[in-house]
Each structure stands twice: as C-alpha cells, then as structure tokens.
Image (cartoon, grey):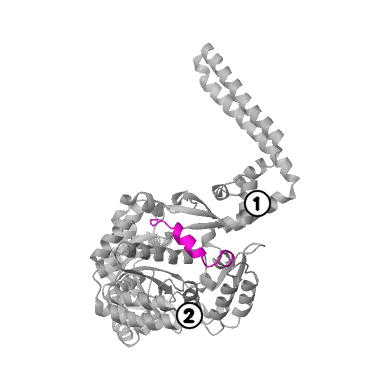
Amino acid sequence: MECHCIRAVDVPHLTRLYSSYLQDFPSVAPFYFHAPTFESVKRVAADVRPDLSLRRYVTEILRTQNRAFGSDSSVETALDRFASGSVAIVTGQQVGLFSGPSFTIYKALTALRLDEELNCAGTPAVAVFWLATEDHDLAEINHCFWPSREGAQRIDLPSSEHEGSRAGEVPLGYAVLPALERATANLEGPAADQIRTALVDCYSPSETYGSAFGKLLARLFAGKGLILLDPLSQDVHRLAEPLYRAALERHAELDQELLARAKALERAGYHVQVKITEGSTPLFINLDGKRVPVRARNTDFAAGRHPLSFTDLTDLLARSPLDFSANVLLRPVIQDRLLSTTAYIAGPSEIAYFAQASVLYDRLLGRMPVILPRASFTLVDPRAVRLLRKYELEFSDVLRGSAKLRAKMEGRLLPRALTRRFDTGEKSLRKMLSDLREQVTKLDPTLDGAMDTAESKMLFQFTKLREKAAHALAIRSSLLDAHERELIAHLYPDGELQERHHCFLPSLAAQGMDFFHELTHRIKLGGVQHKVLYL
C-alpha cells in the first residue's frame, strides 16, 4: 500500500496553537504540563500512582458496561490489568451516527498503538474510549456522510424533538431503519457482510445513540482489548461528585483563573477555544430533560431562567449526581480522576481545549496527562488514485483549492506535442532574456531593475497563454468537470479533510478487517505527519 506523507502543519485551516504544539512546543509549554512525546508518556507512567481501591470500583462499573456492549474476552483481560494498576491511555469522541467521521476510528487506533508501545517497553497499559454520551448537541451526531461510488451522501435522523437532551438518553427510533437501508445498500468488499450485520444488530430502534455506538465499537474492535466507558451512569457520577462540589464551591476562583488564561493565550497570539465570561461555571444540570449551563449570579446561581442557591445545588448533587455534568474543560479532569490517565489522544480542537483546561487540572487534580495528537489519514480509493495519476497530481494539489487544482488539471490535458512546444518556448524565452540581461547591464548597470520587470511580465504572459490554451481544450472536455468534482468530493469534501467528513465503515468494508492492522502499523506517535494512503 503506497503511503505519501505531508507535514500536519501544512494542512489548511489548522490553528496557530495546534501548529505550535506540534513543531514548536516550547512556545506553548506554559499552557500544558508535558511535551507531546513518548518519553513524556513513559515518565508520567512511572509517576502515576492510581488509588487501587478506586480502580477496583471503577473496574466493576466498566465490566458491567462492557458486557452490556457485547465486548469480548480481550476486554475482560484488559479490565483485569486495569484493576491491578496498569496505566490508562484514554481517548474519546461524540457518539456519532454509524460511528461518525473517520477520525473517531483513528483516535481509537492511536490509543491502541500507544497501549501496544508501552506494553512492549515494559509498562503495563490499557486503552480506554470515553463515549461522550452527555453531549447535548444532537445536530453534530445525528448524521454521517457515507461515501459511495456516486459521492458521499448525507444520512441523518430527525432530532428536533430531542434538542438539548443528552445523547445517551435519546432513542434512535424507527427512523433509523431507512437510514440503515441506505447505508448498508452501498457496502462493497470483503468485510461488507460483517459491517452490514454489525450495523443492523447494533442500530435497532430501541437503542440510544450512546448504546448503539458502544455496541458497534465493541464489534469493530473485538480482540483488541479496547475498554469502553459510558459516563452517563449514576455510579460514575457518584464518583465525580467531589469534583462537581469543588467546582461549585470554588467557582469564583476558577472563573478568574480561566479568564486570566484566556487573556494569556490571546497575548501570546493564540485563539481561545472556549469563551469564558464573568459568572461562568464548568457545570451543567439536567432540567426537564434538557442540559442547561449553571451560571453564578451575585451570591447565588441560575440555570436558564431557574434561580438556584448554593444549598439547592449541593442538595440536588447529593440526591442525584446524574443530573450534573461537566463542560468541555472540566470533563477531562473528571475522566482523569476516575482513570488516573497517563496520556490522552486528542484532535486539534481538543488540544486547544487543554490549553485552558490545564487551569482546572492544576487547581482540582494537581496533575495532567500527556496530550498526544491522534493519527491523521486520507484514504485514496483506486478510482481516485487513477485520476491523480492521470493528471499527474499530488494530494497537496487538491488542498490548494479548486482554482489551482483546475489549472493544473487543464495543463495536463494539452497534447504532448503542444506541451513540448511550450516547454521549449519557455526555455528559449528564459535564455533570450538571460543573454539580453548580460548585454543590457553591460551597457548600463542601472537597467537591471527594468530587466527584472520586463522578464517577470514576459514570463507571466507566456504562462497565461499556456493556461488559456489548456482552458480552451478543457472546455471541449466534459470529463474534466466531473473529474475535478470527484477528486474534491472524495479527498477534500466541503473544504475539510476527508477524516473530518466521511464515515470510515465503507472503507473498512472495502479493505477488510485487517485494514485496522495496516493503519495501526502506519501510526507514528506524535502526529507530526498527515498520511495519505493509496488503496
């Protein structure tokens, strides 16, 4: 399998913070605890001292959950290792329809790869996937983009009646059946039947987004020991209660610290991923089935239009901790309190979150895991490979935008004889200008600048003539439009990397279940390269 690499920092639309994190960590070190290296992971792993009584309690929660998801004996073995003190490598994601965008899978594979590397280095480790079942943004998870020969089709479920509800409590309903039919009808390849069966078995109308997602991951990663954790559990929230209480008691202090961190990021020239305002708290509560942020108001609090005293909130917390949940900055702190996490596998946006969340880690936990970037892939199917080669293109040409891609494709349409004439003409023009420069500057050295201007304009016009000839030919070729659209739709859909858009499952069906092994083999910890695989 042919693999091309480009620097992750050369991918369009990455933030300056993420670019600095990958290639100039000292410039962002004040916002994080550890450099994103394997050496940092080994050092933190050696220092982690999990509370084994807490570990055993959490293990039993996880054992019950994973059995409900249908996990196999490899997970039971991993849970035994977790209970005895193995370090935890954690990742997580929203519970998107039919596994969501491809990077969800790449996160899990990166966690498993780090788990494997640590075990090989003599450090017992397990991989844990945190299901974001408390997320209430259904518009982000109620759909997927399903690639097929005709291009990616959007498959979605209605969500209007459940807006604001936690994803792990929203049933799929019977609308999932036609969605399943559309998805499974377009599966081809050696693993098509296996993927089709898994989808039908896991995504029944009675399942929630969370339970279906968990069951699907248990199927996909069978034999790999990936532990799944669903936080939407009374037992999990009971363990999180001390951190919820601390966030309430110290809300003013934490808010000021977070505001100061936001200003520090902006002074350093970086963006602030999570907007912090006066009166913010890192908590939500569940009111009438909706997830509502808690805000400080004078000496009391409010959730939406509901005024609440500190006593109201602490009484509710004691009675029903499941009605509380953390925002995106506090959530990983709770996760790492429960799991004693050594390393977290994160995407670019999450890495930005952690630049702010490190304040809460410092104040509430006193430590923070190593944050490692997830693996990043673009999968180029055989038809797209043929088109790239037909037009002598690289993946990076597609990233440069439609206009530049089109110009390069048009240039490859010129007949070879005409292309040779243009090449010869350009060489002759450059030689003539070089000879002319020598003679003109001997006559008057001050004319060198005028010569630069003349040379630039003449070469520009010659290049424009070549492009116009190619464009005239392209107008007569109806295939070029289709090929351009196909390449963009497959490799850079809607101006995004494929991994952020397309669902992974059709590619897995086409390549077979061993494709997981191929991808894991390609993962290099540290995430400084985006890998383009020609299938």
User: Residue 190, how many percent across, how many down?
Assistant: 59, 68
**Label tally:** 2
Q: Which amino acid does label 1 sit on?
A: Glu
- Residue 266 at least partly seen: yes
Q: Does the magenta stretch include residue 81?
A: no
Q: Which residue in the protein does label 2 denote?
A: 211
Alpha carbon of mark 2 to alpha carbon of mark 1: how far?
40 Å
Tell me if residue 261 comes above or below residue 56 in the rendering.
above
Residue found at the very far right of the displayed protein: 476
Q: What residue type is labelled 2?
A: Ser
Apparent side of residue 306 relative to residue 57 in the rendered image (left or right): right
Q: Which residue is at 61% across, 54% downward? A: 488
Quarter location, residue 135: bottom left
Mark nearer the N terminus (2 vs 1) = 2
| Range shown magenta | 509-526
- Residue 274 at least partly seen: no
Q: Which residue in the protein does label 1 denote?
A: 484
Apparent side of residue 293 relative to residue 42 in the rendered image (left or right): right
Q: Does the magenta stretch include residue 515?
A: yes
User: Residue 469, how many percent across, how many down?
Assistant: 71, 37
Residue found at the very far bottom of the displayed protein: 319
Instruction: Tell me the chief SS of the magenta region.
Output: helix
Q: In front here: 447 or 192?
A: 192
Q: In front here: 74 or 488?
A: 74
User: Residue 476, how many percent across, how many down?
Assistant: 76, 45
Question: Circle 1 sits in a helix, a strand or a loop, which is it?
Answer: helix
Tell me if residue 101 comes above or below residue 392 in the rendering.
below
Quarter location, residue 261: bottom left
> Dot 1: few (<14), some (14–19), or many (≥20) neighbours within 10 Å?
some
User: Residue 62, how many percent across, how many down?
Assistant: 37, 80
